[in-house]
Amino acid sequence: MMNDKTKNATLSFHGKTYELPILSPSVGPDVIDIRKLYGEADVFTFDPGFTSTAACESDITFIDGDKGELLYRGYPIDQLAEKSHYLEVCYLLLYGELPTAEQLEAFEYRITNHTMLHEQMHYFLRGFRRDAHPMATMVGVVGAMSAFYHDSTDINDAAQREVASIRMIAKMPTIAAMAYKYSIGQPFIYPRNELDYASNFLSMCFAVPAEDYVVNPILSRAMDRIFTLHADHEQNASTSTVRLAGSSGANPFACIAAGIACLWGPAHGGANEACLTMLREIGSVEHIPEYISRAKDKNDPFRLMGFGHRVYKNFDPRAKVMKQSADEVLGLLGIENNPTLQVAKELERIALEDDYFVSKKLYPNVDFYSGIILDAMGFPTSMFTPIFALSRTVGWIAQWKEMIGDPTQKIGRPRQLYTGATERDYVDVEQR
């Protein structure tokens, strides 16, 4: 961040003029610094959803919605998805640079040897109802980690912050898999140290004690890409929740649990689940014209899920990679005749050709393809968001650690535009 002394914004208010500094990022739009505005002018700014407000300074992830660009520490997401793998991306997000071979080996070893959960956590998890949504289970279990790992909750100790970070990245696949196994009444499968990160997760989800389970490398690679593509996404709702919780000094497990709770919302992490539900509601290709007409009708509340993106105005760079994985997975599994898949492919064709969709830039996004892939792999829709949470954990942790180390960071305290009653006197109940 640079403060150009020659660049200022001028605000005229109530007959007075205020000079506001202009901050210049390494890439992206300039930022007007309003930190002193309230103290000097006794005025707030109004920005519902904070869509025009920079709440922090960060050097982790950059998005250019107009260009359809997503960078992790400066590296384009398509390059990382093609040439790298999830744990290498984790290292990049956490430490700022791609690791050497020795650094990567040491990092992978640390993650692999922290994948098991404290055995007593099994009993805690079994306290949930069998029909509990896996996200509900994950929120509770991750929040409860602070009750089991007391040696990594002091946020002022750099060594404890590091241990907590490694533990959460390592244990989140185990927690997600256990939540899934519990929901379907199958025994928990312990992690296996000889497997890579994605393969280990698939094993814990789909293996059973009665027979051997061999992870298909195409499915493992597809899962690894899903992890990579969802690893971080700048200051979105759940990341902002983690930062806001962290600004109070809360322990890291509580902060990540808060992020998981926020991600659960259908407008955020639940979008791919909502997309697949919509595809199943449409049911068959013959019904598509009816739903397309409804989507174009401004008076109809129906909306096509999985198309367009709030941030990306031209295309979602993650969707291109995800489409390639979808083609590979569906080709491997040979389920091209699946009715839901047929609906998805026809909707995809229409979205890329129909003038209405093209003009409004309603292209298939990452949620559209990820839902198809996870469904083809055998995951129920209830597991889509837990997998998203597992993927995003490293991004939340990287953002949390950055926030802890930022000397300008303060406890979050958004202001409001109050529209309620002005001061009035209390009236005794007999006189009301």
Image: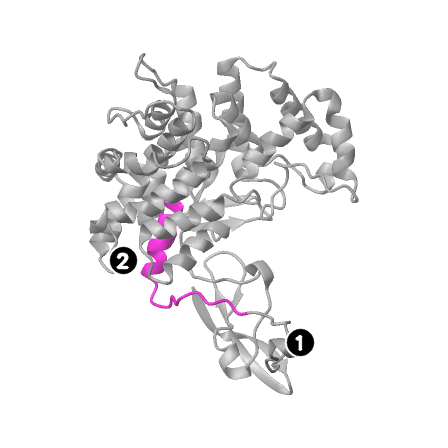
Question: What span is colored magenta in the figure?
Answer: 394-415
As drawn, 75 above or below 283: below
Q: In percent of the image, x 55 and y 82: which residue is there?
A: 41
Among the 4 quarters of the image, the one containing residue 268: top right
Closer to the N terminus: mark 1 or mark 2? 2
Q: Nearer the viewer, mark 1 or mark 2?
A: 1
- Callout 1, which amino acid? Arg
Q: Residue at x 67, y 36 (%)?
A: 304
Judged from the image, the secondary structure of the residue bearing numbered disc 1 is loop
The reply to whether dot 1 and dot 2 touch (C-beta < 8 Å) is no
The spot of residue 131 in percent (x, y) is 46, 31
- Dot 2 amino acid type: Ile
Residue at the extreme bottom of the image, as rendered:
15
Q: In the picture shown, does residue 214 fall above or below 414? A: above
Callout 2 crowding tier (Cα within 10 Å): few <14, some 14–19, many ≥20: some
Query: Is 301 included in the stretch rendered in magenta?
Result: no
Residue 32 appears anywhere in the view: yes
Image height check: is 347 above or below 402?
above
Residue assigned mark 1: 432
- Residue shown at 37% from the left, 63% from the top: 248
Q: Position of residue 142 (x, y in %)?
A: 35, 44
Please name the residue shown 39% across and 33% down the image.
Answer: 179
Depth check: give the residue in front, 307 or 10: 307
> Percent from the top left, x then y, of residue 401?
33, 54
Q: From the viewer's perspective, tell me whether residue 141 is left or right of residue 28.
A: left
For the C terminus, the image quarter is bottom right
Q: Position of residue 32 (x, y in %)?
A: 53, 69
* Disc 2: which residue: 155
